[in-house]
Image (tube, coloured by chain):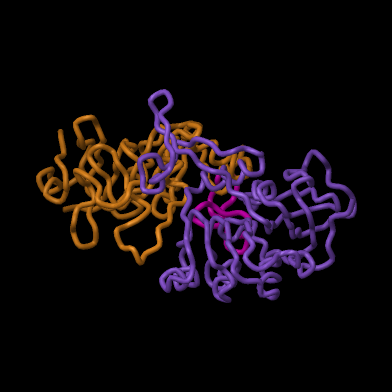
Amino acid sequence: MDKRVKTLRDAVAPITEGASVMIGGFGSSGIPFGLIDALLDQGTGGLTVISNNAGAGETGIAKLLKAGQVARVICSYPRSPGSIWFERRYEAGEIALEVVPQGTLAERIRAAGAGLGGFLTPTGYGTLLAEGKETRVIDGKGYVFEHPLRADFALLRAARGDRWGNLSFHGTARNFNPVMAMGAAHSIAEVRVLSDAPLDPETVVTPGIFVQSVTEYGVRP
Amino acid sequence: MRRLGDADLAARVARDIPDGAYVNLGIGKPTHVSGHVPEGREVIYHSENGIIGVGPVPPEGQEDPEMIDASKRFITVAPGAAFFEHCDSFAMMRGGHIDIAVLGAYQVAQNGDLANWATDDERYPPAVGGAMDLVVGVPTIFVMMRHQNRDGSPKLLERCTFPLTGLGVVNRVFTDLAVLDVTPDGFRLVDLTPGNDLADVQAVTGATIHT
C-alpha cells in the first residue's frame, strides 16, 4: 500500500466542479495552505466549503472566495478580523452561508465518519439555529436533532505522515483535521514531513485508514 | 459614574475564579482575565481549538503559528497541558467538564438569556463559534461586557431583542459599572464599582436591579 502522491497538484486532481470539500484548520493552525493553493490553480468552481472559518486576508480559503470558486460555505465563525473576501461575497449575495455551532459542526462530521444517522445535542435548543429542526426533551432537558455532515473531499494539514496515510500533529494544529479525515469520502493530507519509515503507532493521531492520499509540503506557514 | 477600564474589569472577574478551576475564556476581552488571577491560585485554561493548559503569550520572535488560542493569539503551554482534536474539545465543553466560561455579550436578560452571536443587522453575517456549546454545557457562565452600548442604550434588559445564544444560562454579569447575579427574581446587585451610586447604575439598566 502506498498513498503517497508526488505533488499537491496531483493530490487535488480528483476534485471536480461542484464538489463538497472539508478544509481543516482554525486560525493560522493546521490549514492546508499548499492544497488550497493547488485547488486555486486548478480553478475548480461551484465548491461547497466546510470549515470552521471562512479565511482571512488574502490567504487560505479567502483565496478561493476571491477567485469565485465557492458557491456555499458551511462554518461556525465566518467573520474573523480581516475576512474581507467572505464579507464581500456574502454581502453581494454570491455565496450561500450555513452557520453551525462549532461543536455541532465537529460532531456532525464525526457522525458521518462513524456511520451514525445523527445525534441529539442541547446546543442551540430554543434558538434561531434550531428552528425547523426536530427536538426532544430528555430528563427535562431540551435537545435538537442534528444530521450527519459528509463531504466528497477533505483537505488536511499534519506535521508528519507515512505511506500508509497515518498522521501526527503539532500543537494546536489538530483542531478539525482528524474528524474531517473521517467525514470525507476522499481525504487528502499535506504533511510537513513525509516519513520513509512508518510512524510510531503510539504517536499516530489519525490512523491511515481515514486518509486516501498524502503529499509532502515542507513549508511551515 | 466611575467606569472600570478593561484591565480592572478583567481583574474583577479574575477575583471570582477559584483555585483549581477549569476555565474557558471567550474571544476578545475575556482573554485578559488569565493575566489577573491572584497569586497562589492554579487555574487551568481551556481553548476550544484544542488545548487545555494555555500558557502566557510567548516572547517576541518565539511565536509558533501552530500554537494559538481561540482568539488566534499566539500562546505557550502551561505545565500539565494537553492537545486534542475538536470532538474531544467540545465534549469537554458540552459534557460539563469545564467549570466556568467567561463570555462577551451584546445583551443579557434578567432571566439569564444571553445574546452574543447575531444582531438584527441582516447585512452583517452572524458568527456563532463555540458560544452555544459552552452555554449549554458549562455550569457557571460569567458575562464580561460594558454596561451600555456606545449610544448609551442598555445591554442589561428585561428581554433580549437579538437572537439568543442560550436560554437562562447566565449566572453573573461583570460590567464596567457593577457586578450583578442572575437570580429567580431577576438581577441582584453583588457590588458596585467603587464610587458609583445604585440609582445612577439603575438609570442606565433596562431591568430592575434588586438588592
Q: In this view, does B117 lie to the left or right of A198?
A: left
Q: Is residue B192 left or right of residue B138?
A: left
Q: Name the one closer to the observer, B194 or B155.
A: B155
Q: Is residue A64 left or right of residue A206?
A: left
Residue that appears at 65% across and 57% down = A30
| Number of disc labels | 0
Q: Name the one closer to the observer, A160 or B65.
A: A160
Residue that appears at 50% across and 42% down = A146
Q: Position of residue B128 (x, y in %)?
A: 43, 52
The residue segment tinted magenta is B54-77
Q: Which residue lies furthest to the top in this view?
A: A139
Quadrant of the snapshot with the C terminus of chain B: top left
Up-down: is A70 above or below B192? below
Question: Magenta span has A208?
Answer: no
- Main SS of residues in magenta: loop
Question: Magenta span has B66?
Answer: yes
Q: Where is residue A74 in the image (x, y as percent from the top left)?
A: 52, 57
Q: Where is residue A130 in the image (x, y as percent from the top left)?
A: 41, 44
Up-down: is A104 above or below A13? above
Q: Position of residue A155 (x, y in %)?
A: 68, 59
Residue that appears at 61% across and 60% down = B63
Which colour represents chain A? purple
Chain letter of the orange region: B
Up-down: is B14 above or below B95? below
Residue that appears at 72% across and 54% down = A187
